[in-house]
Each structure stands twice: as structure tokens, then as C-alpha cells.
Amino acid sequence: MTEHTKQFVDDKGVETILIDSTITGGFKGTSQCRPLDGSVQSIMDDTFGLIKETNTWSDLSDINNKWLKEGWLQEQDGADREHIKVVASNEGFGWSSVAVWGFSEINGQRWHVRKVSAVKDGKQYNVRAVYDWLPTEGSY
Amino acid sequence: MISSIKPLYFHSDAYFLSLFFLFSSGQLDSIVKYQPATKMAAPATKTLKNISGNWILNQKTSDSFEPMLVIQGVSWWKRQVSNH
């Protein structure tokens, strides 16, 4: 699944990240629109159903989860823009999640990482996702 | 052989000969040969200030999403798609 990402300021002045996913072979997958203004988005997602989601900048001070806080690289751009925090929940399925985006050092190199911690029925599920940068896409 | 009518061209020696010529001379390389994507660590210029570009999940270094997707109610079919 390749994520085609665009970061821009929309016509209301809100910084936004737009992600179009394509599955291997070029089939169009889902689209995500993430305004980074902390507004609550109600989204009918193909995969996750009806979810509520907020996207904000974070300096990790607003995060209590120890696992989410650790393992990040110090960035050049100042603490206020180092991380993106995504809080999501699905009332129907009874789960909520907090995700932190940033960059980590793995095997001596800098990688884009998204750590997600989801809770359901008091049980916590942690996933660290590591992303490759694609300077060129596959072509024929 | 070629003396017969046009629709039979696809069965003719000339058709196979021309295909053979196109392949062997490298004329079709740009169509047939797949150039795989280049995957690498994040360059220093890529920060959350501008994350624009193409990213792909690294299956080797990432944790499995499976247990989390199960509790999030994602169906088996959708979970298979998310692996590709």
C-alpha cells in the first residue's frame, strides 16, 4: 500500500495532510484528509467504519502513554512541529486510539514512524509502523 | 503464406518475425521491463513540516497490525488488502 501524501494550507488557512493510498498494482484505495487544527472529524471510513478523529501538532507533553513518548528523534524544526497526534475512536466497536507521527532512528538511519496505541475493553494494543520513502515509484 | 487476406496477418510468419525483431532489438524494453520503486530511509529534508511525497509501509521493521485491526472490527478481507 503506497501513500501519496500532500501537505498544504487549505483555503481557510488550515494546514492539511491529504493521503491517497494505492494498493500494489495501482488500484486506488482510501483517501484520508487530515486538517491539523484539532477539529473533531466524523468520518465514514471504508475500513474502520464510523470514526471520530482529531489531528493536531504535538510536543508530546499532552501524551500520557509512556510507550508513545519514547524512541523519537530530536528534529531540527522546533518542538511544536516535531509530532502529529491523531486521536481516533469508534463508539460502535468500542475502541479508541492515539497515534503519534514522527521520525526515529532505526539501524543507524532516520525513518518516518507512526506509533499507534489502541484500547479496547481495558486492553492496550501497540503498533509501531515504519515507512519507507519512495523517491521514485515503480514504472513500466 | 502472406498471399492470403488481411485478418490472417496475426497467424503469419511476418507477424511473429516482427514481434521477434521488436523484442530482440530492445524496442519494447520501455513497455515490458518493470522498474521497481526505490525505497529508502527518510532524507533529512523530509520533516513533518512538509511530508509531501510517497511513502510505503516497511513490512520488515513494522509491527504486525493484525491484532489491532481485529479489535477494531476490520474484516478478514480488508485485513488482507491492508497487507498489500
Image (spheres, coloured by chain):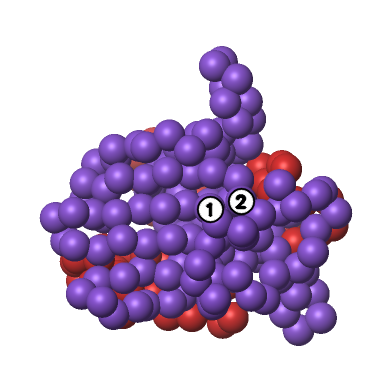
Chain colours: A purple, B red
Left or right, A22 with respect to A11, comes to left
Query: Does residue B76 appear in the picture of this structure?
Result: yes
> For the residues marked 1 and 2, what is the alpha-carbon distance in whole angstroms?
6 Å
Residue A85 — which label? 1
Marks 1 & 2 on one chain: yes
Q: Residues within 10 Å of mark 1 (few under 14, many from 20)?
A: many
x then y, percent, for residue A39: 43, 34
Chain ID of residue with mark 1 = A
x then y, percent, for residue A89: 29, 54
- Amino acid type for the residue under numbered disc 2: Ser
Left or right, B53 with respect to A129, comes to right
x 28%, y 80%: residue: A123
**Mark 1 or mark 2: whose residue is earlier in sequence:** 2
Towards the viewer: B27 or A136? A136
Residue A26 — which label? none
Towards the viewer: A11 or B1? A11
**Element under label 1?**
strand
* Residue receiving disc 2: A58
**Residue B56, quarter of the rendered image:** bottom right
Left or right, A93 with respect to B40, comes to left
x 62%, y 25%: residue: A9
Q: Check the image and name the residue furthest to the top.
A: A11
Left or right, B25 with respect to B55, comes to right
x 56%, y 15%: residue: A11
x then y, percent, for residue A32: 43, 42
Chain ID of residue with mark 2 = A
